[in-house]
Image (tube, grey):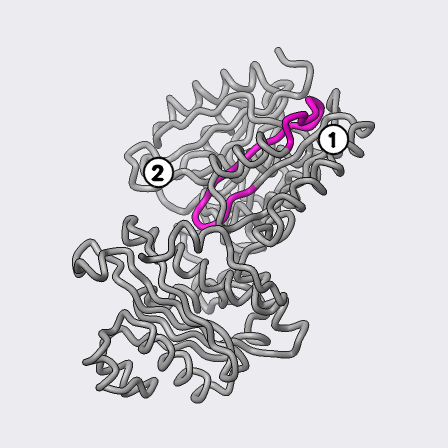
């Protein structure tokens, strides 16, 4: 058994086993545990079968210091976590007053009756300690199973994310580790893993062994992680960070969990300025990315989704002759879309996008994956034509991110083009 405390993860749900639901929660838990120097030693997924759940839970509790159970806390008959843990611990299910009070408050704030199905979520193993859920109806809870601490969490990702703050902080205080990992995360856009690794290998061949280098590619960003396990090595980590910032420069968006949309809004709010969007091929995704950020109304007032050509004309004032002469996917059209959005919204900056998301609709001159971007202000509107011949959903994601990135660069006064322009510029 490892010298560090052992944490195991038990996920439950037929929907995960069948593939109807993609498991993102285990990655979320593992990343948060890594921040306090803990790893997931073992992970198992089990369907909604009480006998199998109990068997796996008892086996894990016999090996681990902590087991985190994810899922099965809801109001339906296939939500089995509470009854399985109670049976394994040899205790009964009781209506927990704190869980019941939470349910009553949750229902009252939504003007909903507290029905019998919901009330099931207040039945917890006797002796369990409640873990507050600030979002959903089901509280989390924990109970000792032998020498193991079992922590039960909801399967809804948004609820789990909020609860992990409390859970991880408490685990960090209570579990003794042989070494504390010191982790720095840099968020980037426009760099792939292989490109970034090759640049580092070429420029920094003497990378110190004490500094762990890791990559986590996502859509649309890539995270670069620097970690050390000894505080004495922090100067080496900091030196590596400075070298990476010099190497990757303006492709680094920020640290931690910084997202492009949040960074753009931060820059806008600092200047007291606003942004509007005029979207065709992305179907409102850029506006959605912005409005996911709390407080986004300070920097984003209006977005226009003008998918059909006649709507581009009616809503944004794009000239019919421009559409007829150049086509919807053209520099002239995105310019008119951006200028129309600026005039109608009164914003300081605009983004406009029009492209061919596929899988059909491409031509020899404008293949699937072609997109025209416009960004900037009335007095300085810039454009670019890029080519991302990828699956439709990914195309929309990277186009939305690229548009936000160009606004970020404009607000920061970055004149140089990003690397992905030379790689993706349409020929």
The answer to whether residue 322 is above or below residue 69 is below
Q: How far across and how far down the image is residue 401, in percent?
A: 45, 58
On whether residue 279 falls in the magenta region, the answer is: no
Q: How far apart are marks 2 and 1 (CA)?
A: 33 Å
Q: Residue 102: which quarter of the image?
A: bottom right
In depth, the one of 156 and 285 nearer the eye is 285
Range of residues picked out in magenta: 204-223
Q: How many marks?
A: 2
Left or right, 208 with respect to 112, comes to: right
**Residue with the mark numbered 1:** 174
Q: Residue 384: which quarter of the image?
A: bottom left
Residue at the top extreme?
A: 1
Q: Which mark is residue 78?
A: 2
Callout 1: few (<14), some (14-19), or many (20+) C-alpha neighbours within 10 Å? few
Residue at the front extreme?
A: 427
On whether residue 222 falls in the magenta region, the answer is: yes
Left or right, 275 with respect to 362, comes to: right
Left or right, 63 with respect to 241, comes to: left
In depth, the one of 194 and 312 nearer the eye is 194
Image point 56% across, 60% down: which residue?
Answer: 416
Left or right, 175 with respect to 33, comes to: right
Q: How far across and how far down the image is residue 328, in percent?
A: 25, 73
Image point 28% across, 34% down: which residue?
Answer: 18
Q: How far across and how far down the image is residue 408, in percent?
A: 56, 64
In depth, the one of 70 and 385 nearer the eye is 385
Image point 44% across, 55% down: which residue?
Answer: 421
- Asked whether the viewer can see residue 152, the reply is no
């Amino acid at each position: 058994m490892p010298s560090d405390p052992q944490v195991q993860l038990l996920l439950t749900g037929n929907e995960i086993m069948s593939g109807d639901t993609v498991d993102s929660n285990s990655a979320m838990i593992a990343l948060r545990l890594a921040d306090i120097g803990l790893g997931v030693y073992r992970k198992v997924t089990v369907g909604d079968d009480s006998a199998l759940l109990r068997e796996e839970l008892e086996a894990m509790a016999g090996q681990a210091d902590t087991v985190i159970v994810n899922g099965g806390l809801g109001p339906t008959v296939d939500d089995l976590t509470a009854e399985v843990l109670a049976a394994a611990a040899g205790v009964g299910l009781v209506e927990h007053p704190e869980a019941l009070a939470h349910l009553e408050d949750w229902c009252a704030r939504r003007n909903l009756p507290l029905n019998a199905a919901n009330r099931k979520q207040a039945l917890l193993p006797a002796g369990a300690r409640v873990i507050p859920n600030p979002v959903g109806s089901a509280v989390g809870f924990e109970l000792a199973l032998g020498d193991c601490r079992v922590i039960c969490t909801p399967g809804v990702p948004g609820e789990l994310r909020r609860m992990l703050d409390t859970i991880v902080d408490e685990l960090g205080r209570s579990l003794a580790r042989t070494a504390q990992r010191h982790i720095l995360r840099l968020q980037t856009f426009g760099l792939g893993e292989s490109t970034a690794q090759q640049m580092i290998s070429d420029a920094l061949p003497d990378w110190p062994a004490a500094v762990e280098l890791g990559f986590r590619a996502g859509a649309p960003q890539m995270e670069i992680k620097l970690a050390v396990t000894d505080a004495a090595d922090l100067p080496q980590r900091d030196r590596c960070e400075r070298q990476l910032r010099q190497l990757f420069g303006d492709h680094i968006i920020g640290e931690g969990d910084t997202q492009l949309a949040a960074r753009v809004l931060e820059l806008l709010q600092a200047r007291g300025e606003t942004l509007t969007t005029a979207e065709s091929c992305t179907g409102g995704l850029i506006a959605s990315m912005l409005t996911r950020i709390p407080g986004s109304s300070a920097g984003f007032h209006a977005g226009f989704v003008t998918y059909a050509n006649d709507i581009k004309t009616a809503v944004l004032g794009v000239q019919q002759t421009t559409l007829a002469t150049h086509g919807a996917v053209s520099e002239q059209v995105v310019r008119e879309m951006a200028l129309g959005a600026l005039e109608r919204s009164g914003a300081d900056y605009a983004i406009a996008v029009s492209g061919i998301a596929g899988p059909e609709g491409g031509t020899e001159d404008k293949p699937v994956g072609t997109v025209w971007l416009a960004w900037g202000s009335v007095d300085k509107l810039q454009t670019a034509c890029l080519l991302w011949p990828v699956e439709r959903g990914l195309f929309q994601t990277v186009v939305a991110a690229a548009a936000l990135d160009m606004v970020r660069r404009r607000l920061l006064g970055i004149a140089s083009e990003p690397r992905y322009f030379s790689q993706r510029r349409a020929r």
